[in-house]
Image (spheres, coloured by chain):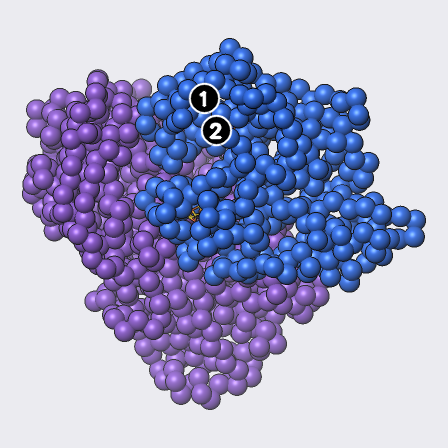
Amino acid sequence: MKPYRYQRARDIPGAISALAEEPNATFLAGGTNLVDLLKLGVMEPEVLVDVRRLTSDSVEELPDGGVRIGAAVTNSNLAADRTIRSRYPVLSEALLSGASGQLRNLATTGGNLLQHTRCVYWQDTTTPCNKREPGSGCSALEGHNKNHAILGASEHCVATHPSDMAVAMTALDAFVVVQGRNGEHRIPIEELHRLPGDEPWRDTTLEHGELITAVDLPLLDLAANSKYRKVRERASYAFALVSVAAALDVGEDGTVRDVRLALGGVAHKPWRATKAEEALRGEPINKANLRAAADIELEDAELLRDNAFKVPLARNVIVRTLLDLAEGR
Amino acid sequence: MSITTTGRAIGRAVDRIEGPQKVTGTARYAYEHETEYPLYLYPVQSEIARGRVARIDARSAEALPGVVIVITHENAPQLADTHDKELAVLQSDEVAFRGQYVGAVVAESFEVARHAARLVSVVYDEESHDVGLRADRVDLYAPDQLNAGFETDTAEGDVDGALSSAAVTLDETYTTPMEHNNPMEPHTTVAVWDEGDLTLYDSTQGVHTVRRTVARIFGLERDRVRVVAPHVGGGFGSKGLPHANTILTTLAAQMIEGRPIKFALTRQQMFSGVGYRTPTIQRIRLGADEEGRLTAISHDVIELSAKIKEFAEQTASATRTMYATENRRTTHRLAALDLPVPSWMRAPGEAPGMYALEVAMDEMAERCDLDPIEFRTRNEPEVDAETGLPYSSRNLIACLREGAERFGWEGRDPTPRARRDGRWLIGTGVAAAMYPVYRMPGTRARVRSLGEGRYAVEIGAVDIGTGTWTALTQIAADALGVGIGAIELRIGDTNLPSASVAGGSSGITVWGSTIFEAARLFRERHGEDPSEGDTVEAGTPDNPETENYSMSAFGAYFAEARVDEDTGEVRVPRMTGVFAVGQVINAQTARSQFIGGMTMGLGMALHEESLVDERFGHVVNHDFAEYHIPTNADVGEIDVAWIDEEDPHVNPMGSKGIGEIGIVGSPAAVANAVYHATGVRVRDLPITPDKLLR
Ligand SMILES: Cc1cc2nc3c(=O)[nH]c(=O)nc-3n(C[C@H](O)[C@H](O)[C@H](O)COP(=O)(O)OP(=O)(O)OC[C@H]3O[C@@H](n4cnc5c(N)ncnc54)[C@H](O)[C@@H]3O)c2cc1C
Ligand code: SF4
């Protein structure tokens, strides 16, 4: 591991300017992802600026009926929060499906959002990777790519975003509160993570030195009827092959009044399934319609050597999760 | 701890003697031995799979404060014996596999060593490599013999004729992937040179094996090498033979006399150079008559070996004796590849081989329209077909019956995909297994009176976490006719009499027999009331009964699988294992071995797979986030039992080995249950959701 300077800023502006002064500096939160990457030599910052104590570590109700989650709230605390569990169960379930108890005790909301891909080639400095070393090539494209993207990828990178929490937040229309040198702004979570395009080294739209301070969940009544379903290769402690975050409101007449749907494990970012949502609104909730909607969402899927199974898997899980919600399961 | 001074100790559930030390953190593992001013080693590993090291520039690494030396083939001392290419560390510029040690940094701290290793720049002359195991390779070859001395091929009767005239036939290919043993404690060596004397604290399954190898390679007298391993955090075969890490550490210590060197592998490094289970491609052909009696068995194995050193696993060996038939053929062919050398992994050969055979038996039972237990019963042999000898005891059928009873097998509807609970498809499966009673040469034991009725029992055996400390104490107590509290067991040190490796489930058979012999001689010479200091040392006595009997342990395995029909996720809520292993020495640690073995088999069925990227030549999923083994949530209820089996022939304890039999049949039981649940026969392990989604 390359030696680095460890810094603890006094306040948020201090942390932001610490990064502004040093192009090769990075924020450290729980460290559960970053420290591994330091050991592997995948990331070699000169300076680590510890932000764990700078941002809020509590979940507050907002005047408009939503909630604000401080960036330093741990994954464990967020999953256990009463408001989250009753009003946004999908988020609590997503968090509890991730990592392990020990890791969730350390991992933070900000760090979880910005955790890096688990692409094995990215994590191995002896293999080419456009994300780690622009222009060196993408080893996953023709390598082991069972865990890789089926939607929105490019010939330069087919990595997936590994977070479960972010998938739930995407279904919930969350906003990410970001502070930079020019003050604070809120961005829809859908605009936080990027698709790889021809700049796969850029994971997010954040500028160097911008700090996530909170995540806002808007008031969303249908979120009380929401669910997270994660499919993985063992019962616990594995990243998603495919996951689905869904919230559903079905009218008296059995038609879909409103729906939120997001997929994990399929793309470089949490994938909001807007096409499927649109196809479902106003339609009777039944297996055929759900299948059709899922197919519309997945019709642009581009398959690699090992990941074709993700299409039927995603379709089945979408159908099953929404049916379960409709049936109050 | 339950200590009584009278009564038979063998067979009781005695708490682990070293338990308190382990839970209080005072049991010393290799890395934890106190040494003065140690240095830390971090290896530089090759980034090509074949070729030569053209240039090494270590200047920036050497310039780093704290770096003591960078070792490469250019400055490494010449080893006395470079015959074994796996162990000829840093002896030439040749690169034989990706991840091979091409250098090492020794520094004042682990962190500095690790950082410096990344600063060593190595330029290679790369040659094209070849790491793909495929059945259609033209260069597959038959080794002279297989591991453990098994014959490469066997043939009896007219297999082709029997197959073509059989009423029912099967011809299927089964594959098992490369797997890596990953004990909790990674391979670790601490090497201390002191004026020509070498002490190694090594995480090993055999201190004397390490001593022998290191002495040979460094050209040292054996008595100048001491190897110490009081506690080892698992091995599963990967610590059965010394690997390059031990040689590298010793070599570094030789270059920097006076400073102990420590080297513990990272988890990632466990995936290159300390052994793995060869992948296999196994074609099985079976023929049976109308009554479901096997008329032909053919088992053809393709597996890999390394170019630098042959490793020929005995995958089809169990097929030679498991069931009765008059026409039988087994073959083994190897592909020698640019990969690290495969090694032992719990039940090497038996586990992958029995997986294929027992799934084939399940398929064949279905084709014969017979219950799989009945099918096996009809094909139970009278004698060991390979040697013609009767079995010293063979209670497979009893295991199957007892297991069926415990598991609730009776009344099972054989129709696949017939039971469900909501979206979960439910199935049950059964499999059988055997594991030979291996005996290894080279063990001695010493009994010494400590006075006041107490005895020191000394033997260089190693406890790799299996419970050897406790089991040998029990054996010694019974052998001397005293309580276990009267025994002071000493193991894990080459200063003690030489002992064979803790492998092949042979430890208790060999070490126990030897302790019995030493105790017998001790009583013969010194009587029941010896003087303090009276000592007797003995070697393992021959067991003439091995000429008269074939000796194996047997087991029956049952599993319930639930498969989510939407996702292909498999859950195994319960398993039953019933074993015929002779006398169980310690009911408690034996149970742990069976549960652990069955759990490892569950992982073999559903999770474990090392993914080699053929372009690069190395395993890319080289950590525990990507290389999956079962988590607690994957392991349901595991019901373990053994039948009362008295085997007067096998050894004085009447015990067969138990370390490996637990894994052997469990993958097939799970695979057969998954088939029964889904109607989908996945023949390629591991059975992951993608293979079940249709
Ligand atoms: C074995 C293992 C299994 C796992 N399994 C799962 C799983 O199944 N599902 C899942 O979702 N996750 C999983 N994780 C990942 C885990 O959720 C993340 O490691 C964790 O959420 C990261 O949070 P952290 O606070 O530790 O971030 P850190 O490691 O401290 O940081 C991660 C990144 O975020 C940046 N960062 C942190 N905070 C901020 C901020 N406030 N503003 C701007 N940038 C910031 C850091 O610079 C760094 O680049 C697993 C991790 C491990 C090690
Ligand atoms: S998928 Fe992306 S992260 Fe993985 S190797 Fe390709 S470029 Fe790198």
Q: Which residue is the extreme one toward the front?
A: A182
Q: Which residue is drawn at 55% across and 42% down?
A: A194
Query: Which residue in the structure is indicated by mark 1?
Result: A20
**Nearest the eye: B33 or B18:** B33
**Nearest the eye: A48 or B615:** A48
Asked if the residue under mark 1 is in contact with the one under mark 2, i.e. CB atoms within 8 Å, the reply is yes
Left or right side of A98 for B134: left
* Element on which disc 2 rests: loop
Residue B225 visible in the shown view? yes
- Chain shown blue: that is A
Mark 2 surroundings within 10 Å by alpha-carbon count, few (fewer than 14), some (14 through 19), many (20 or more):
some
Q: Which chain carries label 1?
A: A
Q: Position of residue B180 (x, y in %)?
A: 38, 48
* Element on which disc 1 rests: helix
What colour denotes chain B? purple
Earlier in the chain: of badge 2 and badge 1, it is 1
Please tell me the numbered disc located at residue B121: none
Q: How far apart are marks 2 and 1 (CA)?
A: 7 Å
Type of the residue with mark 2: His
Q: Position of residue B677 (x, y in %)?
A: 64, 62
Query: Quarter of the image holding residue A95?
Result: top right
Type of the residue with mark 1: Ala
**Quadrant showing the N terminus of chain A:** top left
